[in-house]
Amino acid sequence: PEQPQPVTPKAPALPSTGEQGVSILTALGAALLSLLGYVGLKKRQQ
């Protein structure tokens, strides 16, 4: 009979959390808030 080969445990892969997409949304939100603040200041100065 064949000898069973020892199973080498692999490191568990981390699940994909979609963190890249979240950071892009955060950057877009910050840019939008900055733009709105800039427009608000321009209107106040007039």
Image (tube, rainbow, N blue to C red):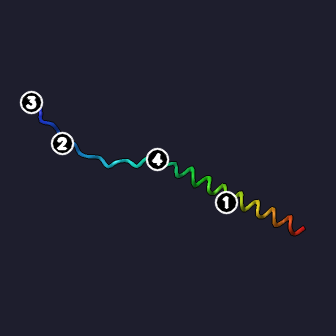
Between discs 3 and 4, the one toward the N terminus: 3
Estimate the spatial distance between the alpha carbons at disc 3 and disc 4, rounded to whole Å.
42 Å
Query: Which is more foreground, mark 4 or mark 2?
Result: 4
Between discs 3 and 1, the one toward the N terminus: 3
Estimate the spatial distance between the alpha carbons at disc 4 and disc 2, rounded to whole Å.
29 Å
Rendered image quadrant of residue 26 = bottom right
The amino acid type of the residue labelled 4 equals Ser
Left or right, residue 39 beside residue 7: right
Query: Which is more foreground, mark 3 or mark 4?
Result: 4
Reading the image, the residue beneath label 2 is: 6
Reading the image, the residue beneath label 1 is: 30
As helix, strand or loop, the secondary structure at mark 2 comes to loop
Left or right, residue 22 beside residue 42: left
For the image shown, how many numbered marks are present on the structure?
4
Rendered image quadrant of residue 35 = bottom right
Instruction: Name the spot of residue 39 as percent of width and height, x first.
Output: 81, 62
The amino acid type of the residue labelled 2 equals Pro
Quarter of the picture containing the N terminus is top left
Residue drawn at the location 76% of the way across and 63% of the way down: 37
Estimate the spatial distance between the alpha carbons at disc 3 and disc 1, rounded to whole Å.
66 Å
Instruction: Name the spot of residue 23 as percent of width and height, x first.
Output: 57, 55
Rendered image quadrant of residue 36 = bottom right
Q: Is residue 10 above or below residue 41?
A: above
Estimate the spatial distance between the alpha carbons at disc 3 and disc 2, rounded to whole Å.
15 Å
As helix, strand or loop, the secondary structure at mark 3 comes to loop
Q: Are marks 3 and 1 in contact (CB under 8 Å)?
A: no
Reading the image, the residue beneath label 4 is: 16
Estimate the spatial distance between the alpha carbons at disc 2 and disc 1, rounded to whole Å.
52 Å
Q: Is residue 13 above or below residue 43?
A: above
Reading the image, the residue beneath label 3 is: 1
